[in-house]
Amino acid sequence: MTTNSSHAGRVVLVTGAGQGIGAAIARAFVAQGAAVAVLDLDHERAALTADELEAAGGTAIGVAADVADRASLAAALDRVVHRLGTVDILINNAGISPKHDGAPAPIDAMDEAEWRRVVDVNLTGAFLAAKLVVPAMQAKGWGSIVNMSSVAGRTYFPSIGVHYAATKAALIGFTRHLAGDLGPHGITVNAIAPGRIRTPLIASVPAAVNEAAIQATPLRRLGEPIDVATAALWLTSADAGFVTGQVVDVAGGWLMT
Ligand SMILES: NC(=O)c1ccc[n+]([C@@H]2O[C@H](COP(=O)([O-])OP(=O)(O)OC[C@H]3O[C@@H](n4cnc5c(N)ncnc54)[C@H](O)[C@@H]3O)[C@@H](O)[C@H]2O)c1
């Protein structure tokens, strides 16, 4: 692994980092000299990703937790602080987008439990993680939080469910409000709105859905997890120290608003 140092000495917590965008973000931070906690609901995935980063010469630990469960998250954070130190950078990346035979349930067929789980993971998970790490950031007078929204939080896409769209839109409001509250403490809070990114999340839909997305994208390709990871690196770097409350689209020009 080639190691640079834009994030040397930083402790980074990435949720949902066992695969996909989160794993790419973890890799990117480690490559910039950060110590990274790879948090995932899937214990094995978290451990494998952390092992890969350690084997490449980085500092990483795998921690299993459900971001929707305060006690589970708090216990995981205790392990992170014990092993790596207090968290400087939080990437709220864990998210789910339930499908049924490759399609989202329409509202009349969507059961309440599915709605609640999506809200709990995608939105409440970000709230809980931020609530847990912010006190240490405030004490240091520095910190940075990135929330993983989606272009689906900004406009209508029929291929995703109403619960997913609602949570991704809510994360934008969450980001702006928190940026206002935490700015005076030296903490930046931004969101990333990815377009269609090539990860296991989009593998469950019919190929035609992804092809249509490519045709609607001016850059005519799916995004790669690293495209999102580099945006997260920049938003949490000293170079972006005066950037807060923003939503950065990483979508190949799919939605230009
Ligand atoms: N892939 C895309 O096209 C795309 C587009 C826009 C936004 N996003 C967002 O980016 C984020 C990452 O997406 P991805 O494509 O890498 O997804 P993915 O499904 O490939 O990976 C998500 C990871 O999160 C973990 N996870 C799920 N629920 C969790 C929980 N309760 N607690 C902890 N970890 C949990 C999963 O185990 C998995 O390892 C999500 O928030 C997603 O909504 C993805």
Image: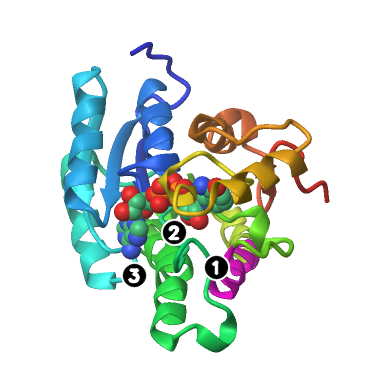
| Residue at image coords 83%, 51% | 257
Three-letter code, disc 2: Gly
> Would the CB of label 1 be found within 8 Å of ligand 1?
yes
Measure how far apart labels 2 and 3 are at the Cα level.
10 Å
* Residue 214 x/y as whole percent: 68, 39
| Residue at image coords 53%, 38% | 232
Q: Is label 1 in a helix, a strand or a loop?
A: helix
* Residue 152 x/y as whole percent: 65, 59
Three-letter code, disc 3: Ala
Considering only vertical position in the picture, is 109 above or below 146? below
Three-letter code, disc 1: Tyr
Image quadrant where residue 10 sits: top left
**Mark 3 highlights which residue?**
68
**Mark 1 highlights which residue?**
164
Prevailing SS of the magenta stretch: helix
**Mark 2 highlights which residue?**
95
Image quadrant where residue 46 sits: top left
| Residue at image coords 36%, 40% | 12
- Left or right of 199? Residue 106 is right
Image quadrant where residue 175 sits: bottom right
- Earlier in the chain: of badge 2 and badge 3, it is 3
Query: What are the residue bounds of the magenta stretch?
Result: 160-174
Measure how far apart labels 1 and 2 are at the Cα level.
9 Å
Considering only vertical position in the picture, is 28 above or below 194? above
Q: Is label 3 in a helix, a strand or a loop?
A: loop
| Residue at image coords 68%, 46% | 213
Tell me the mark number nearer the camera, choosing from 2 and 3: 2
Q: Are marks 1 and 2 in contact (CB under 8 Å)?
A: yes
